[in-house]
Image (cartoon, rainbow, N blue to C red):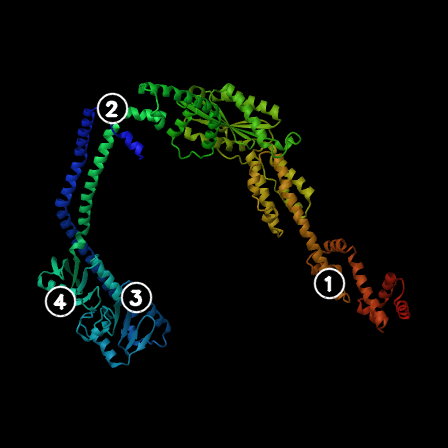
Amino acid sequence: MSFAKWKSLLPRKSDSWQQRRFYRKLLALALLIAGVPGLIIGLGIYFLGGREMESELQKLHQNQIQQRAANLNDQFSYLELSFSHWAFDPRFDENLRTFDVAHNFEGTRDLFKTLLVMQGMHPLISRVELYVDEPRPLLFDTDRYTFLKDEKQIQLYQSLLGESHSLYWVLPSDKTPEAGISSDGSIALVHKIPGGSMRPFGEIIGKLDEGKVIQMLNTLTPYNGGATLLLKNRQEFILSENGARPSPLDSALIAGVREHGEDSGSFLFDWNGSTYSVSFGQINRLGTPWTYVSAAPVSLITKPVVLISQLVLWVSIAGLLLALLLSWFASRRLYSPVDRVVRLLYGKEAAGKLPGADEFELIERQWHDLTRESQTLQNRLEEQLPHLKEGFLLQMVQGYLYSFSEEDLRERMVHYGWEVEDRHFVALVIQLTGFAQLEGRFSQGDEDLVTFAAANIVQEIAGGRIPQSEVINFHDLSIGLLIAISAEEAGRLEQILDPLCDQMLKTIHAILRMEVTIAISKSSTAVKYIPYLFEEAKQALSYRSLREGNQIIHVDRLPLTSEGAESAYPFPLEKEIIHAIRMGLETETNERIAQFLDELSASGAKERIVQQGMLQLLGSIQHAILQSGMSPSEIYGGANLYEQLIQLKDPDSMLQWFRQKVVRPFIQELSDKQDLRMKQMVEKVMAYVKDHYMSDISLDLCAEITQTNSYTLSKAFKQVTGLNFIDYLTGIRMEKAKELLRDTELKISDVAEQVGYQQSYFNRAFKKYEGVTPSQFRETSRRT
């Protein structure tokens, strides 16, 4: 806030002393009411509630430790139960006594897989081993097996078999030979196999990951600076967060726990200048009690309470200061309401230069000025209201106001001048067709101009008959008309709308020379359903008959079921169209499509039936294009032909679109492809003739080589080379014969044989081709 603003809030010189004294009393009272209770509450929370919160936090801490200890017990119990389950697995039965590791590959692999599954069944397990004493000491782990030869190692595993229990724990603190199993500081779980056998011959040994056990143990003390340890029989150290060796704090805690005779409990423990809250309890592991000990510094447990108490105290003090500031600010505001209004109306600088008039006179004068400005803005708004009204309806019809509630939509309709209370809404969609027949009057791209003209005609006719109506220009040769009528008028809806629609049909047809179809929706009293009314009217347009001219379609008169016999699909004509387009016959294809469309729209077929048939024909043509080895996407530039066809509403537009957008591009592409293929085919035949002219070559043989028929090959050969196939073959043979006659001493019969002729036929063919006999050609060429 600027200095001038603060200065404006201060008492002015004209204020009396009593006014200023009352202001001070008001300020003190406001401060007393707003600040003192908050300060008293803060002090009470700090001094009285702090101790209670500390006690509750310690109880909560102990409850958390007990819950986490129960979780620790559950983890170990799950391990014991899992090992008991695996010990009774058929893979570890009596057959292992005679198991041949070297030759029974499948069984050995199953053992490795089983050990690997056991190792992965619990995150605490780091390694699983299988020891078998018979027929010879054998040790398995998850990736190999070893026949034991070291006597000490054998004695170690055999000592595990001597244990009286089938399932037991081996701890680093155990002073027995089997403690060597956990000599690396880890905890191991051993189960003899087979499970339940009186003569076990092996054991499954699962070693726990010390790091993960310590990590789980640390959950008992979530505070930094504490300690967590695990004891056996409240005497022997097993593990702590420092590992397998106890720290000085761990040793002190063990001594403190021993002094308490109970199996579980809590106490405060002083060590090295700090006070710890110690909690301990027991978990029974296979008949042996394990004791968990958790120690956390009391300062860390109660630290949140201290911080909260201090925060409450400081917040109370800050609240007192804020109350002082707000009380002063509010009291000054009470003295200057009129001054603020004047400054708001005239501005800060102009307010100080105003003549010494009454503030209410100044406010009244300014109010009249603002009223005149408001009236001017209202007039401008009324000029733009029709455009805003149409834009709002267009947004609603297109679904952009779907998230608005019924109340919001009604409020906006009222704002735009609609009367919506006890009103029925009806949607009309006017569709113009026959634009393709208007060549000469309109050109391609004038659809928007035609729609605009039709919209003006509809507005003029509807506005003169129905007071509450609004035209929506869809700019695609279709127009929407929303009308609102009373409940009494809704009962005779057809009597009102049929004459209106008939007049619109005749007027638009007379002026624009286009056919008009009007679809009338059902009525609804809900503004929110107006978009659905327009949607059902648009869908009803597909029921128009292509054989009729101007039409009026009532949605409530449409059949509830599909009309199966409206039009039969002309499959024979479809086959003729596919055949003609494959042969590249553009004129014949266009004629067949026109016949197809006439036959499809026969007997007054509805627009939707005709459109579905034309869509199916388009799909068949595209399928034929794919079968010809060409891509429709490349021919038509990736255009969505189905979407373009759906936009067409009259047969003439569909037929013109098929000719220009579908048939002509494909025929052009097919012609280019055929010319290239024809040239490649002829070049292949010419090369073959040059290499095998001395053999018995025929047109049929070359057609078989090029995988075509003789007629097509002969026609292509003539088109590419300008010669018939026989003339070309004869020319190649005669040129080779002339070369042999000129450069060699071969007999005439040998020359004829080498160029693929018999001598008698060769003489006649050569004379016909050169005008002389082969002998005369040889003599003449040698003389020259």
Instruction: Please state which of residues 653 and 491 is positioned toward the viewer in this rendering.
Output: 653
Residue type for callout 2: Ser
Q: Which residue carries the number 1 mark?
A: 687
Residue type for callout 1: Ala
Residue type for callout 4: Gln
Left or right of 418 on screen, residue 709: right
- Check if mark 4's residue and mark 3's residue have beta carbons within 8 Å: no
Q: Residues within 10 Å of mark 1 (few under 14, many from 20)?
A: few
Q: Is residue 579 visible?
A: no
Q: Which residue carries the number 3 mark?
A: 119
| Quadrant occupied by the N terminus | top left
Q: Residues within 10 Å of mark 3 (few under 14, many from 20)?
A: many
Marks 2 and 1, how far apart at CA: 120 Å
Residue type for callout 3: Gln
Residue 235, labelled with which disc?
4
Question: Does 108 appear above or below 270?
Answer: below
Quadrant for residue 274, please give it.
Answer: bottom left
- Check if mark 2's residue and mark 4's residue have beta carbons within 8 Å: no
Q: Residue at x 85, y 72 (%)?
A: 747
Q: Residue at x 76, y 61 (%)?
A: 698
Q: Which residue carries the number 2 mark?
A: 14
User: x%, y% of residue 774?
Assistant: 87, 67
Marks 2 and 4, how far apart at CA: 89 Å
Instruction: Please state which of residues 67 and 684 is positioned toward the viewer in this rendering.
Output: 67
Instruction: Please state which of residues 442 and 301 is positioned toward the viewer in this rendering.
Output: 301
Instruction: Please state which of residues 537 and 605 is positioned toward the viewer in this rendering.
Output: 537
Marks 3 and 1, how far apart at CA: 73 Å
Q: Nearer the viewer, mark 2 or mark 1?
A: 2
SS at circle 1: helix
